[in-house]
Structures are given as structure tokens and as C-alpha cells.
């Protein structure tokens, strides 16, 4: 047959045919399928790893120097199956009893293990007797303006409230008061209300890309979240300090983002440490600890804290072009209570940990924590309490029991002359004067 020209309306019919086929495909889906969007899946996948926080705290009253009790609320995210929870520090600051409720209505009480006021983040610990589901962590390095995000939290006490918006802008600096400045924040128009603080900001993959932290008072649709990359680094620092209270291994790691995805690499190995005997070197990539995959520093620190140092942990490490399996022995840190000041001053002391001294006072980053005070002793007479941290005595810092022993060996103490001492009670410095006991209070009653 001779070639015939294609009618002008044929491409339209072909396109229409494709369109009709697409409509038929949509119509073939059940109503429930059409309702289960990416956002629905994202919220469904994260809800079990979000917890609601409640508590009471003392705040200044509106009039004068009086105080009053107020109810506080907030949100947290589970970052480790053993019950470690990340939230904002301002949510739990000053709260004596932090009540936690999970999405399946289990209730417990949380303990604050570590905090960083500068970034307004804190690590809590809860125990429900079984491993807990953890939040899926994404990346904040590839966020797009106008990308859809969702906030989940305890808004005004309405637990697990979901609100939706977009990424409005990135890299915001927000000063909320004289003491608190947030930097590099995600701005969103997702509704964030009192009680949302500490909860996750999610992308459509159900990954946490931020920690909700603040709103612009009086504005509509202006709220902020800490980028998850920044939050994970702070959380890793806090967990690392917790682990170093109990464990020593000599391995320093860092998170490296490759194509916006986090990977865990060895940053350094301490000579003569347990890690130095494994063959692991700087630049090696850690793939897993035990059967737990590793993608960032927080994964690593949580895995070591969970292991507890009872036995060596097995690491799968990418070393050059090969993968090797090594056993990392972990040495336990021995915390010994010192009796060196018991007879002379009437108090037992222990080395204060890094976490205890974190942001406590700009002049003192080390000290000796009081664990017991003998009634009737010089320390008791001066009002020193268990939990106080002795930071200086007679003009010398008391950063270790060795420092204290040297100070007490000076001639002035042999003559029982009065001397000035400094302690920290929480973040407040106090000073006083006392002298070495004229009799042995520890054995004389």
C-alpha cells in the first residue's frame, strides 16, 4: 500500500489513550490505597519512637522574688533501643520528675544523663524492660526549600500531634533571650507549639531531619528546628562523655557525609590503648559493631554504652580494599572514692566526671565531688553537702585527689590555720573558710 499520512488527531488520541489508561489504573486502586500517601507512611513509621514528656518546675512568679510551680511539657525521640532519648534541655531543665508516655500508652520516669545548654540538647534514659524502636535518622545537608516536612509532638499536651508544612529557609540564627542563641536552624511553616520542643521534624521518607526547638512569638507560620546533622554530633559528644565515665578503648571516630549520607570513619587511635592492638588505623571505615550497622558517631557511642564493657565487642572494619573483623577489648574505668579528706575535713570525695562539669562554670572544668559529709566535722559546720564539687582550696585548684593530697601536705594545714575553699553547687559558686579538724572526727564520737 502506498504510504498514508498520519491524521493530525492521531497523536491526540494516543495521548488520550495514555491518559485514559492512567485514570483506569487510579480507579482500579482501592480508596484505602489512595489515602495511604507517603506522608501517612512517614508518620506511621516514626510514631513508636516519639515519646511525650511532662513535669513540674519552679519558675519566678510574676511579682517580686516569689516562685511558683508550673506544668511543663515537651517531646523526645528514642535514639537507642536501650532507652536513650534526645530532647531539648529547656524541656527538662529544673524538672525533678520527668514523666514519659510512649505512643502505646506505656508510662515511666526518665533520668537526665547529660545536657548541653549551649545547643539546648539533653540525653535522657528510660527503662521499659524491653528494646525500644528508634527514630530513623536522615540528613539535613540535602534539604530543599519548599520540601514537605512534618512535625510530631506533645503540642499543648495533645500527645503525638502531627502538623505539616514546608522548609521555609535554612541557616537561620535566632536569639530567644539574653542567654540562648540558636544557629544554623531550619525554618518551617509547620505548626510548632509549646510542647513540640524536642520532637522530630520529618521528611516524606519518615526520616528525622531536625529537632523542633522554637517559634516566633506573635508570628504565623514561622518556627524553627535544629538540623539533624548538628543534633547528632552534639548527642554523640554527650553519649561519648557518658561512655568515657565507665569505658576506655582509645578509638576516636568521626561522621563523614558521602553523597549526603553519613558514614563512620576512624579519626585517631590512642597509642598503647585497646584499639591500638586491633590493627585498626586512621581512615578505616567502621561498618558495624556486633550486628548493629554504623552510620554515625552517635551509633558508635550508643553501641559501646550498651555493650557495657563486659566483653570485647566485634567490629567489622573496611581496611583498604578489604573488610576485616576485629575484637575491641574495653577497659573499665575504676572510680574510687577518696578518704584523703575524711579525717581532716570530714568529707569523702570522688573525681567529678566530664559530664558533671560540662558548662558548670567558666573557670572550673575539673573538681572533686562530695559523696559523704561527716556530721559535726569542719565540712558539715560550713554547710557542705553531698553533690557539691570542691574546686579550690587555700588558693589551689583541687582538680584531682593528687592535687588535694599535695594541698593538705602544706605547712599551713599542719598548723591548722583557717583557709578559704570554693565549691560549686549546681552551677552556683560558693566559698567559705574552715580549718583542719583538731581531733579525728572520723573515729571520735
Image (cartoon, helix red, strand yellow):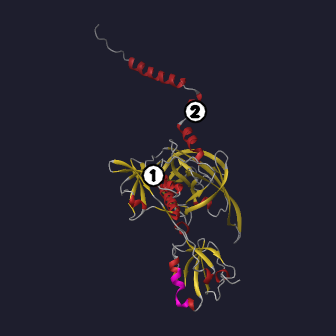
The circle drawn on residue 100 is: none
* Circle 2 or circle 1, nearest the eye: 1
* Residue at image location 48% in from the left, 44% down from the top: 147
Which secondary structure class fits the magenta region best?
Answer: helix
- Is residue 337 among what the camera can see? yes
Question: Which residue is drawn at the image coordinates 52% and 43% (left, top)?
Answer: 206
**Kind of element beneath mark 2:** helix
Q: Compare residues 285 and 224 and report the one nearer the observer.
A: 285
Judging depth in this view, the residue of 63 and 386 nearest the camera is 386
- The x and y percentages for residue 101 are 66, 50
Q: CA distance from mark 2 to mark 1?
A: 44 Å
Q: Position of residue 267 (x, y in %)?
A: 39, 59
- Residue 344, percent from left and from top: 61, 84
Against 411, residue 69 (above or below) is: above
Q: Is residue 255 magenta?
A: no
* 297 on left or right of 29: left
Q: Element type at marker 1?
A: strand
Q: Badge 2: how crowded within 10 Å, few (<14), some, or many (20+)?
A: few
Residue 198 percent across, percent down from the top left: 58, 54
- The numbered dot on residue 35 is 2
Q: Quadrant of the C terminus?
A: bottom right
Q: In terms of image quadrants, where is residue 12?
A: top left
Q: Is residue 231 visible?
A: no
What is the residue that sits farthest to the bottom in this orientation?
A: 415
**Name of the residue lying farthest toward the top:** 1
> Which residue is under mark 1?
314
Q: Say left or right for 4 vs 69.
A: left
Q: The N terminus appears in which quarter of the rendering? A: top left
Callout 1 environment at 10 Å: few (<14), some (14 to 19), or many (20+)? some
The residue stretch that appears in magenta: 404-412
**Horizontal relation, residue 34 to residue 8: left or right:** right
Amino acid at each position: 500500500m502506498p504510504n498514508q499520512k498520519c491524521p493530525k488527531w492521531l497523536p491526540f488520541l494516543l495521548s488520550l489513550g495514555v491518559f485514559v489508561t492512567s485514570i483506569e489504573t487510579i480507579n482500579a486502586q482501592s480508596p484505602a490505597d489512595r489515602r495511604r500517601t507517603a506522608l501517612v507512611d512517614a508518620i506511621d513509621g516514626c510514631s513508636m519512637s516519639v515519646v511525650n514528656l511532662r513535669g513540674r518546675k519552679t519558675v519566678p512568679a510574676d511579682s517580686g522574688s516569689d516562685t511558683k510551680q508550673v506544668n511543663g511539657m515537651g517531646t523526645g525521640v528514642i535514639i537507642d533501643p536501650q532507652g536513650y532519648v534526645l530532647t531539648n534541655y529547656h524541656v527538662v531543665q529544673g524538672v525533678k520528675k520527668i514523666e514519659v508516655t510512649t505512643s502505646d500508652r506505656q508510662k515511666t520516669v526518665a533520668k537526665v544523663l547529660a545536657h548541653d545548654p549551649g545547643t539546648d540538647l539533653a540525653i535522657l534514659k528510660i527503662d521499659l524492660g524491653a528494646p525500644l524502636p528508634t527514630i530513623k535518622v536522615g540528613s539535613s545537608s540535602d534539604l530543599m526549600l519548599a520540601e514537605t516536612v512534618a512535625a510530631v509532638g506533645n503540642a499543648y499536651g495533645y500527645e503525638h500531634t502531627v502538623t505539616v508544612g514546608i522548609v521555609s529557609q535554612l541557616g537561620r540564627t535566632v536569639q530567644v533571650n539574653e542567654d540562648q542563641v540558636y544557629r544554623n536552624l531550619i525554618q518551617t511553616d509547620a505548626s510548632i507549639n509549646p510542647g513540640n520542643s524536642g520532637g522530630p521534624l520529618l521528611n516524606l521518607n519518615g526520616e528525622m531531619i531536625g529537632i523542633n526547638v522554637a517559634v516566633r512569638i506573635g508570628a504565623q507560620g514561622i518556627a524553627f528546628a535544629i538540623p539533624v546533622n548538628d543534633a547528632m554530633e552534639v548527642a554523640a559528644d554527650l553519649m561519648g562523655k557518658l561512655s568515657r565515665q565507665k569505658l576506655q578503648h582509645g578509638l576516636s571516630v568521626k561522621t563523614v557525609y558521602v553523597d549526603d549520607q553519613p558514614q563512620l570513619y576512624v579519626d585517631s587511635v590512642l597509642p598503647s590503648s585497646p584499639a591500638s592492638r586491633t590493627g585498626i588505623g586512621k581512615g578505616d571505615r567502621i561498618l558495624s559493631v556486633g550486628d548493629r550497622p554504623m552510620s554515625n558517631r552517635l551509633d558508635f557511642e550508643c553501641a559501646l554504652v550498651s555493650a557495657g564493657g563486659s566483653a570485647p565487642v566485634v567490629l567489622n572494619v573496611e581496611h583498604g580494599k578489604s573488610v576485616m573483623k576485629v575484637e575491641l577489648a574495653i577497659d573499665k574505668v575504676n572510680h574510687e572514692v577518696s578518704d584523703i579528706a575524711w579525717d581532716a575535713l570530714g568529707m569523702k570525695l570522688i573525681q567529678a566526671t566530664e559530664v558533671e562539669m560540662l558548662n558548670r562554670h567558666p573557670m572550673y572544668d575539673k573538681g572533686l565531688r562530695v559523696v559523704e559529709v561527716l556530721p559535726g566535722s569542719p565540712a558539715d559546720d560550713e554547710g557542705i553537702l553531698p553533690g557539691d564539687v570542691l574546686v579550690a582550696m587555700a588558693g589551689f585548684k583541687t582538680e584531682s585527689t593528687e592535687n588535694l593530697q599535695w594541698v593538705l601536705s602544706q605547712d599551713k594545714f599542719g598548723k591548722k590555720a583557717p583557709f578559704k575553699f570554693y565549691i560549686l553547687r549546681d552551677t552556683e559558686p560558693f566559698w567559705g573558710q574552715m580549718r583542719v579538724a583538731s581531733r579525728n572526727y572520723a573515729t571520735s564520737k
